[in-house]
Image: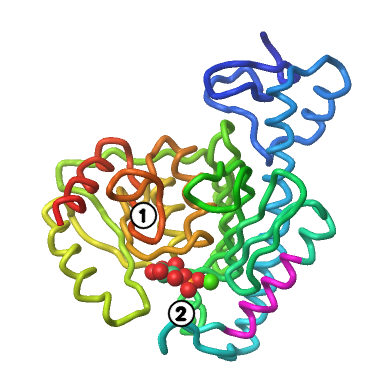
Amino acid sequence: MTGATQVRGGDQGVVTASDDDDVVGCGFCDASLHASNLTVRAVPAATVVLMAAEELELIAIEIAREAGDLARRRRSEGVRIAATKSAAADIVTAADREVEALIRDRLARRRPDDGFLGEESGAERGTSEVTWVVDPIDGTVNYAYGIPAYAVSIAAVTGEPEPQSWTAVAAAVYNPAVGEMFHAVAGGGAWVENAEGRARLRVSEVGPAGALLATGFGYDPATHEGDLARVARMMPLARDLRRIGAASLDLAFVAAGRLDGYFERGLQAWDHAAGALLVTEAGGRVGGAPGGRPGRGMTIAAGPELFDRIRTVIESE
Ligand code: IPD
Ligand code: CA
């Protein structure tokens, strides 16, 4: 097959693509490419499924961008803490609520049959297969302090709307403070768009100096001792450790090879739903410990070899 309007099959599923093996179809591709596929030839069922996922990716990207730009605008006007949640350090700003309301409104208009699971406004089941999992501002403490590491995180998942069983199909993580959009579609790769252009994401391989690791700490002070003890056990694997303060960006950075690995206890579904797809589409692994999927107990993300080493340290607790 040659030429940009062909449809190509393979282990990753059937994707729209040019004949460059390194570039597979993605939601940011030329929409006319997809349109021409739809109109000029019979499209196999798997392709239709992926095209639908690409539509979801485009919606996630578009809404994340609008929502992130609102968050950044509100930030420049001054942050108002609206409430505290699980602990005094667990804050919600007026912008968290406003941004989630905007995302929910946009999704309801575009995808009225889909379900919704958001950090600030809760869950609503839909009648379609799809649920949107949303953190309107991940890294709220950074946002409140003016540290430019916060993100809008939007994932489209299918199946039961709970992280132990869902399948993530599309994701966008947008950091409006630096203008970086990370996005992925299942089977179509993970990508970043920023001032330097557009690049496909790949996880790193750890060098001889050890792994650049990241972690996070829960808001409940009672959990800090255990989390710090885990960090101490992990340090023999590390060249250094980062605490960025936004789980979706930690995961995006693992996908981009800016971090070698990440582990954190206590994440909520909306913290990891989008970022986990970025990592797996960038060739990495995401899971919990012991075994299983990421969740409240533990989230680990890394390239395949480092993933096992991190998990071994955690499981030795
Ligand atoms: C938090 C951030 C932080 C992580 C916490 C999360 P929020 O999300 O992702 O990095 O350590 O566990 O709750 O509260 O800023 O949306
Ligand atoms: Ca949040």
* Kind of residue sitting beneath label 1: Thr
Q: Secondary structure at mark 1?
A: strand
Magenta span: chief secondary structure: helix
What segment is highlighted magenta in the picture?
93-104
Reading the image, the residue beneath label 1 is 299
Q: Nearer the viewer, mark 2 or mark 1?
A: 1
Q: Residues within 10 Å of mark 1 (few under 14, many from 20)?
A: many
Residue occupying the far top of the picture: 1
- Circle 2 residue: 141
What residue lies at 73% left-to-right and 65% top-to-bottom? 104
From the Cβ of disc 2, is ligand 1 less than 8 Å away? Answer: yes
User: Which of the image's four quarters has the C terminus?
Assistant: bottom left
- Taking the magenta stretch, the answer to whether it contains residue 59 is no
Above or below, 42 relative to 242 = above
Q: As shown in the figure, which amino acid type bears the numbered disc 2?
A: Val
Pick whichever of labels 2 and 1 is earlier in the sequence. 2
Between residue 178 and residue 236, name the one nearer to us: 236
- Along the horizontal axis of the image, is 224 left or right of 285? left
Q: Whole-percent x and y of residue 85? A: 49, 84
| Viewer-side residue, 20 vs 170 | 170
Q: CA distance from mark 2 to mark 1?
A: 20 Å
